[in-house]
Amino acid sequence: MGALSGKVAVVTGGGSGIGLATAARLADTGASVAVVDLDGVAAERVADEFGGLAVQADVGRSDAWPGIIEAVTSRFGGIDFAHLNAGVMTGEADITKLDDDTYRRAVGVNVDGVVFGVRALVPALTARGGGAIVATASLAGLIGFSPDPIYCLTKHAVVGLVRSLVPQLGEHRITINAVCPSIVDTPMIAEQRGLLEQSGFPLIDVSAVAEAVIDRLSGEESGQAMVIQAGRQALAFRFGRPPGPRAGGTVGQLPPTEFAAHDQG
């Protein structure tokens, strides 16, 4: 039996690319897998390969998540792991040409899909005594990425959310981490693949990302942003500390953990 035998995992955007690779790898380890995708046909195709559950849903809609949780728990009895992977690019570098629908779609899938997913999953994972969540961010969530600034914005948001949720999710014995790959060979880059290959830029195989996801789901670390580059092992990004206050005896002091800013602008 696999290392995750008896566990239940949810993978969003599981119909193709990184999600498909992760779903297949989870099944190989012995987990029961729910494949969630906006493309119901793709979700069915992937789930059928290993006897999993296919769920057609728009993860960027908050009202979709109760149904996702219900479908998975009804079929498998609970949820232990989640890979919140669904994502899109805008394909627009020029901020003056960005239209509202493209912007809202990117934020809806890339940010709302993670926020609503975590919110819905925490009670389900807590009911199992804890668990693990991994969100797909991007190297563009750690650096500037001028070819698609809005995609970059959404992935920075994912990294920030993951790092901020560590203390409260830890109280529920839930770890949360992000994977931050460079450009991965998936259908998302189909239109640019020729250009990338011509330039000699190395693409990451989806299997490398899937392995990093499994490693985070089965590990104890939390709040990490795992950088994945072609030909290198995944490693946790080192975040620097910004300068702290210098007033009186408060040098380097952080705000109290109970602090919540309101109307700070």
Image (spheres, rainbow, N blue to C red):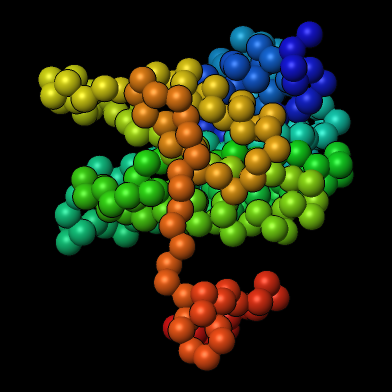
Based on the displayed image, in which of its 4 quarters is residue 2 positioned?
top right
The C terminus appears in which quarter of the rendering?
A: bottom left
Residue drawn 21% across and 25% down? 201
> Which residue, as the protein is rendered here, is positioned at the far front?
249
Query: Eyeballing the image, is 1 above or below 130?
Result: above
Query: Eyeballing the image, is 87 above or below 29?
Result: below
- Viewed as shown, does residue 216 lie left or right of 74? left
Foreground residue among 35 and 126: 126
- Viewed as shown, does residue 130 lie left or right of 38? right
Based on the displayed image, in which of its 4 quarters is residue 115 positioned?
bottom right
Whether residue 43 is visible, yes or no, is no
Based on the displayed image, in which of its 4 quarters is residue 260 positioned?
bottom right
Residue 3, image x, y percentages: 74, 17
> Which residue, as the protein is rendered here, is positioned at the far bottom?
248
Query: Eyeballing the image, is 67 above or below 187?
Result: below
Residue drawn 59% across and 43% down? 177
Residue 180, image x, y percentages: 44, 39
- Viewed as shown, does residue 98 lie left or right of 40? left
Foreground residue among 233 and 141: 233
> Which residue, as the protein is rendered here, is positioned at the far left?
198
Residue 77, image x, y percentages: 86, 31
Residue 192, image x, y percentages: 21, 28
Whether residue 82 is visible, yes or no, is yes
Residue drawn 38% across and 49% down? 142
The N terminus appears in which quarter of the rendering?
A: top right
Foreground residue among 71 and 96: 96
The image shows a total of numbered marks equal to: 0
Residue drawn 71% across and 50% down? 120
